[in-house]
Image (cartoon, rainbow, N blue to C red):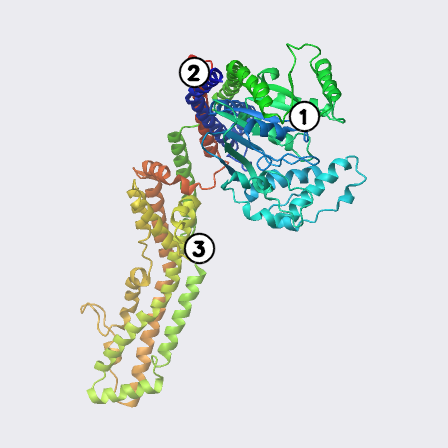
Amino acid sequence: MSDIKESLDAVLRRRREHLPVVDEQLDRWTRMRQLVRELSAATRSAGPAGPRGPAHAALDSLDTEAIERAVQDCLDVLAGVRGRVGRNTVNIGVSGRARNGKSTVLQSLSGLDDQQIPSGRGQPVTAVRSRIYHSATDRGALLTMHTEGSFLREVIAPYHAELGLHPAPGDLSAFARYDYPPPADAAGKADQPRLAPMLARVREAQEALGTYRHCLTGEVRTVDLSDIREWVAYPEGGAAPPVKRPYLAVRDAAITCAFPIDEVTALGLVDMPGLGELVPEAEAHHLDGLRNDVDFVIVVKRPTDTNAMWAEEDARALQLIGSVCTVADVRDFTMILVNTGMCLPENVRALSDDLTQRLNGNERHRGYWVVLEDGADRDAVRDRVLRPVLEHLATALPRMDEAVIADAIAVCRERTDVIAKELAAWTAVLRTLAVPTSAEQTINRAERLREEVAASLQAWVDTLRARTADDFDDTEFLERVAEVHEDVRSWALDGFGEGVEAWRERALNRLRVDRASLPFASMELNRVRVEMARRFAAVDDVLTQRREEYWAGLVDALGSKLALLARDSHDADTVRPQDFLQALARVLHDAYDPCPVLAGTLDSALDVRLDYHTRVLPHLRRALDVLLPEPDDPAGADGPTTLLAVPRTAEGAELLLERITQLARQAAYDAQAVLAREPATAAQALFAYGEQFEDSFVRSEQSETEFRRLVAQFQDRMWPSDGAGPQAVTAQVRRVRGLVAELRRLIGDVDPRHPAAEGSLR
C-alpha cells in the first residue's frame, strides 16, 4: 500500500497548504461579523424615546439581517473548508442503521474488539460518537466530557422538545426533581410507538443521574482501552439496578490504536451511532459532525430475513449522508457495504438485486458503489473494502477538495455581492442625512445654552427690578422692624433692662457720689446708644434671608445644565445655593481649559453685602446721634447736656430717667424710620448686583468663547440623558457611517474574486 500511502500523504500536504489563507479569510469574516453586530446595535442606539425626525426614520429603515445572513453563510462555508484542510488524517466514517453490523466492520478495520467497540444483537449498543485513529505506538482513549450545561442542552432538552414537555430543566437539580409522566401516558397519541421509548430513555437518564453526575465537568479524561466500553456503549441487558450510565456524560471519544494494516496512511475512523435510533435529533446531530470530520462514509446494510430489501429508512439514511457533502458527488463520497456475515445467500442476493435495480437503476458505472463482504472477516474487509476505498480516495480526494474549495469561493463571491449591494444602499441613505460635525454641534449647543441662560437671567433680573418699584412693600422686613422697634421701646420703658426702681436707685447713688448728674447721664447715654445699635441688628436675619433668596434665584436662573456641574458632588436637597455657586465657580476655575471670566463673575456674585453692619448701621448711626452727650460739632446745636442737669435727689433721678427715656424713644423712632427705607435700598442694591452679573456673564468680551469652551469640556455631564436628541442622532449617524465604510473596506479585502485570494485556495 506504499503507493496509496504516498498519494494520500501528498493530498494531506496539499490540504495544509491552504490553511494560512483560509485562516486569514476566517479572521476577516469574523471581524466583519463583529462589525455587522456593532452596526445593528448602532442603528438602534438612539432608542424609541424622544422626538423622531428624518434621521431616525432613515436609520430605522436600515436592516442588517441580509448582511448578517450573508456573513454567517461565508463563515459557515469557510469553517467547513477549515475543518477539511486542517485535519492531519484521512477519515472514513462507518454508519448505517442500528443492528446491521456497523460496529463489527469497525472492529475489522481497527483491530479493536467488543471491549472497545461493542457489538451485539437486539438493542443498539453504540451510545457515543467515537473517532478511532491509527498509531503504531499509542493506545488509549481521550474522552471529552459534557458540562452540566451542554448535557442539559444537547441530551435532555431534545427529549423534552420531542415529548412536548416544557420548559426543559435549567439545571441538574431541576432535572433530578422533574416529574416525568409514566410511559402509559404516551398511549393514545398517534406517534405513541415513537414517544413511549423516548420517555423511557429520558427516565432512565434521570434514574441513573447519580452514576454520572460527577463526570459532567467538561474535562478531557484519559481512559485505558480495557475500560472504554462503559463510556461509549449502552449497558448490557439484565444489569442490576441502579444501572450505571457513564456514557451519558461523554460528549466525544477519541481512541488511538494500531490498525492491522501495513503501511497505512494517517487514517482515522469515525464510529457513528446507528441511524434510526429513537433518540431525538441524534441523526442530525451526529451527521452534522461528518461535515468536517470525514472524507468518505461506508454505509453498512445487513440483509437478514426482515432486512433484505432496500427500505425507505435506508434511503433516508443515504440522503442524510449525501446532505453532508452537497458539493462532491455522493458516489465519490459513499460506499454501501452489504454485510453478508451469517446471512442467507438468498437474502444477500435479494438485497444485491434490489440495490442494482431500484437504487442504481442498472447503471453500475454511474450508480452507488456497492460491495458485498462479511464485515467480521478482517482480511476481506482490509483487502476488499478498505484498500479499494483508499485507492479511490487517492484520486478522488483532490477532486472533492477542489469541489469544496470552489463551492466556498462561489458562496463567498455571491454573498460578497449581496453585502456590497446592501452597503451601497446604506451609503445612499446615509448620504441624504445632513448632520452637524462635532465642532458645529459644540458651537450650536454653546449658543443655545448661552441664549437659554441669558433669557433666564433676564427674567430673574426683572423680578429684582420689580422689587425696586415705589409701590413694592417688603411686608416681612417691615414687620420685623416693627418687632425690633417694639423690643427696643419696651427695653427703654423698663428702665433700660434693669427695672425702673433699680435704675432710679442706681442713678441716685451715682449722683451723690459724683456730686453731679452729667457724668452718670453721659455714661447712660453712651450705654443706651450702644445697646440700641446692637438690638436693631436683629433685622439682620431678614437681610441675610434676602441675600440667600438672591443666590437661590441666581442658581435657578443659571438653569439645570450648569447646575449639573455643581451637583455632581452635592446633595441638592441639603446644600445651600451659595455652595452650588462656589462649586460651579471651582469647576470653571479648575477645568482643563479654564473659563476665568465666567468663574470670576460667579465669585463676584458670592460677594453680595447686604448685612446690617454694612448696609444699615451707617444710616442708623445718624438716628442715634440724639443720644450723644455732646454734639460732634461744638459750634452746632446744643446737645442734651442742659436736659441732663438735674438735682441730686430722688426727684432728680426720676427726672433724669424720664429725659433719657424720652431721648431713647426719639432715637428708636428715628431708627425705625431709617430701617423702613432699607427694603427699597436693599432692593436697589440686589437689582444692581443682579444686573451686573447678567451683563458680565452673558455679554462680556470673553463670554461667547468661554461658553463654547465650557460646552466642549462638559457637554457629556450637562446632557447626560440626551440619548434620543439631535446630538445623539448626529453621533449615531457618524458611528453608522464609520462602520459602513469599514465594512466596505473589508469587503474589498475579502473579495474572493481577488486573484491572490482565489489562487491561494486552489
Query: Is 673 left, or right, of 372 in this rendering?
Result: left
Residue at numbered disc 3: 472
Residue located 42% across and 66% down the image: 480
In this rendering, the label closer to the viewer, 3 or 2: 2
> x%, y% of residue 79?
50, 25
Whole-number angstrom distance, CA of label 3 to CA of label 2: 92 Å
Whole-number angstrom distance, CA of label 2 to CA of label 1: 48 Å
Label 3 neighbourhood size at 10 Å, few (<14), some (14-19), many (20+)?
Answer: few
Which secondary structure lies at badge 3?
Answer: loop
Amino acid type at image mark 3 = Phe
Is 538 situated above or below 106? below
Which secondary structure lies at badge 1?
Answer: loop
Q: Residue furthest right?
A: 188
Tag 3–tag 1 contact (CB < 8 Å): no
Is 170 situated above or below 280? below
* Residue 60 visible, this orientation: no
Ranked by sequence position, the earlier of labels 3 and 2 is 3
In this rendering, the label closer to the viewer, 2 or 1: 1
Residue located 50% across and 20% down the image: 423
Label 2 neighbourhood size at 10 Å, few (<14), some (14-19), many (20+)?
Answer: some
> x%, y% of residue 450?
39, 38
Residue located 35% across and 56% down the image: 681
Amino acid type at image mark 2 = Ser
Q: Nearer the viewer, residue 357 or 747?
A: 357
Residue 760 bears which disc, if any? 2
* Residue 31 visible, this orientation: yes
In this rendering, the label closer to the viewer, 3 or 1: 1
Ranked by sequence position, the earlier of labels 3 and 1 is 1
> x%, y% of residue 442?
39, 34
